[in-house]
Amino acid sequence: MFVIDASITLAWCFDDESSRAADAVLERLEHEDALAPPHWPLDVANALWTAERRGRIGAVDLSRLRALLEGLPVQIAPLEVSTALWSVLEAAREHELTAYDAAYLDLARARGLPLATVDERLQAACADAGVELIG
């Protein structure tokens, strides 16, 4: 099992964001489950909505992406209020991340799992925090 963030997910959705690392993670999901914090589907949905509003994707694309995303073996980890307020806040402050990105880092660190991301700031924070990266 490993933690997945929205950036790696969106790399599968947009041709100009694809990479070998993202493809390798998608292949890994064929035989291994991923874990994400509760905001992951909202993070992905917001990016897709923004892309649709800007004309970057259309209805046909969304239909294809729906099939891909709904088929992913991603479990949503529960989040306690105290974790969100203090542990995630601490990670955000320590690594100068948004609370949303810090939640991915904090989940990976707390569970002792590697993190799949293509976000460079989050990758740097993982290196600083001793969290293994995938991709």
Image (cartoon, grey):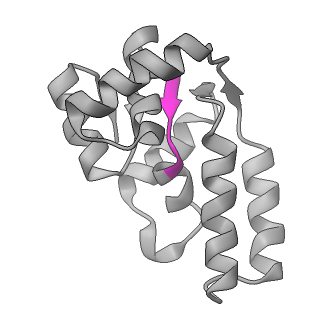
Q: Is residue 28 visible?
A: yes
Whole-percent x, y for residue 93 in the image: 26, 31
Drawn side of residue 62 relative to residue 36, left or right: right
Q: Residue at x 44, y 52 (%)?
A: 22
- Does the magenta segment cover residue 2? yes
Residue situated in front as seen by the camera: 73 or 81: 81
Q: Residue at x 64, y 20 (%)?
A: 77
- Find the residue positioned furthest to the left: 128
Q: Is residue 126 visible?
A: no
Residue 25's place in the image compared with 76, above or below, is below
Whole-percent x, y for residue 35 in the image: 59, 25
Residue 106's place in the image compared with 71, above or below, is above
Residue situated in front as seen by the camera: 92 or 62: 92
Q: What is the span of residues highlighted in magenta in the rendered image?
A: 1-6
Disc tally is 0
Whole-percent x, y for residue 107 in the image: 47, 20
- Find the residue positioned furthest to the bottom: 55
Residue situated in front as seen by the camera: 70 or 98: 98
Residue 103's place in the image compared with 7, above or below, is above
Residue 56's place in the image compared with 13, above or below, is below
Residue situated in front as seen by the camera: 46 or 134: 46
